[in-house]
Each structure stands twice: as C-alpha cells, then as structure tokens.
Image: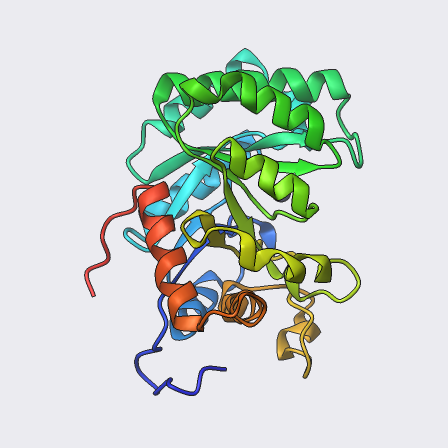
Amino acid sequence: MNEHNNETEPALKLVDIGANLASSAFQRDLPQVLERARAAGVTQLVVTGTSVAQSRAAQLLTVQYPNTLYSTAGIHPHDAADCTNDSLLVLRELAAKPAVKAIGECGLDFNRNIASEQQQITAFEVQIELAIELKMPLFLHERDAFKTQRDILAHYRDDLDDIVIHCFTGEKHQAFSYLDIDCHIGITGWICDPRRGYHLHDFVGDIPLNRLMIESDAPYLLPRVTPKLKLEKSGRNEPCTLPHVLKSIADHSGRSMGEVATQTRRNAINFFRLNQPTE
Ligand SMILES: [Zn+2]
C-alpha cells in the first residue's frame, strides 16, 4: 500500500498501541501474524489486557517477543464484576513486570451494560487508583459513557500520569473535552468504516498530532476499505492493516503518511515508555 516500500524494509515504521494478540483468534499462527505486521512496518505492539487471564497471557507474550511486544494489565468494563481484591493483586504483580506498560483496558461501557453501571464505576476507580499508585499510564475504553467517564477522570486528573482513550469513536466536542484534560486519542480502523466512523474525518485533523496514536484493535475492526482486504475472508483483523488507519488519518488531516507515522510512533514510544527501537 506504500509506493516507497521495497521488499525488505517498509518505509514507514509504526507502533500498534492496541492489539488483542492474547485472544484465541491468534493462538494458531501468531508468529506469521507478527511477520506480516513487521512486513507492513509495525515494529512494536502493545498487547491489550482485558481481564486477569488475558492480562497474564499478554504479559507472557511479551517474554516470548522481547522488544517487539509490550502489554497492558487491566479489567475491561464488561468484566467489571471480576474486579475483586484478588484480581487487583494479580494486576499489581503483572504491572511490576518490565514489559507491562500501562493499566487498562479499563473504563466505562454503558452501551451494553454487561456489568452494572455501579460495578463498572467501582472497577474503573480502583484501577485509576492503581495507576496513580504505580505511576503508570492508563489505557481506557469508553462507550456511551462519555460524561461519567470524563467527570471521573477530571476528578483524578492531577494525580494521574498519561491517559489514552483507546478506539475513540465519539463526537468532536467529546474529543476536545478529553484533550482539555490532556488525554491522548487512539484511532482504529473505525475511521475507515463508512457506516460508523466517517464522522471522525471532519475533525481528526484538529486533534493535535502530539496527542494522536494508532491501533489495530485486532482481531476486531478490520478496516473497511476498497478494494476489500484479503483478510476479510479470514474474518479477523491483524496488525498488518495498521497502514490503512494511518492513511485515512493522513488523507483527512492534510498531512503526509510519513509525518503521521513518525509522530504517532514517537508519541507511543514516549507514552508507553517503550525501549528505543534499535533500527
Ligand atoms: Zn475497547
């Protein structure tokens, strides 16, 4: 997809800040998935921890692929009922590992309310407190819970390290409101989806480039582009599609792909305190 590519070294180097590689969807062929990612320029990836079990599995992957994979440790709002004292002990233990770089994915999801709103708020607040105590960044999910989530974050903001709203899908005023309390914004293939994400085109260029990061959210959110990606047959997204997210951001913000790639990668390395890449 990039005309400057030659076969060995892709011209653009990218960090995927949210890939669910501990998902069973990748159990069979993770080495090949990572090879395809690398060929597409995705040199470092942050594996999302969404539950105690997934956070542990994500951390184990970081040991298998040092300097390529990093991870987060957290409990997704859907699993908020599992956020017990015992779970927090495990998250704390995982967070002490060198390649675990953020607390999350946590936050609020009032779209499906799989856990009750009160359970979600409690689980969110204890994970915020953990991030404050450990001085770690927060990797956040939010769906149909903007006002409550923003108010809770604002309350804790001064004590918190960096925050990213992963897979941002909201409206312009919501993006700006998160930016007002100095959050970063993560953009996924949602921006390529004509049915759901085209409203992002109108303001993605207004998000300061030093607050923007990109993510595949694989195996979810395969970018809907034309011509259709071959991966569509597999029914799963992979980190190697990240250049499509990059291209959409570049196209709709009047910037070059190179500029967006360089800056979003720099943001990710600083935000998650990744090792400086050797190449
Ligand atoms: Zn999410």
> Is 159 positioned to the left or the right of 151 in the image?
left
User: Viewed as shown, does residue 63 lie left or right of 177?
Assistant: left
Of 228 and 55, which appears nearest the observer? 228
Determine whether 258 is above or below 178 in the image: below
Q: Residue at x 53, y 61 (%)?
A: 28
- Find residue 137 and report its horizontal and vertical position in percent: 41, 32
Q: Position of residue 120 (x, y in %)?
A: 68, 22
Is 137 left, or right, of 145 in this rendering?
A: left
In the rendered image, which quarter is residue 94 located in? top left
Residue under the image location 62 percent in, 56 percent down: 203
Q: Quadrant of residue 63?
A: top left
Identify the residue at horizontal 66%, vertical 39% (top origin): 174
Q: Nearer the viewer, residue 70 or 14?
A: 14
Across and down, in percent, residue 253 comes to 54, 65
Q: Is residue 221 visible?
A: no
The colour scheme of the drawn protein is: rainbow
Name the residue furthest left. 278
Image coordinates of residue 107 in percent, x first then y, are 61, 30
In terms of depth relative to the viewer, which is nearer, 230 or 118? 118
| Ligand 1 position by quadrant | top right
Residue 114 to residue 169: above or below: above
Quadrant housing the C terminus: bottom left
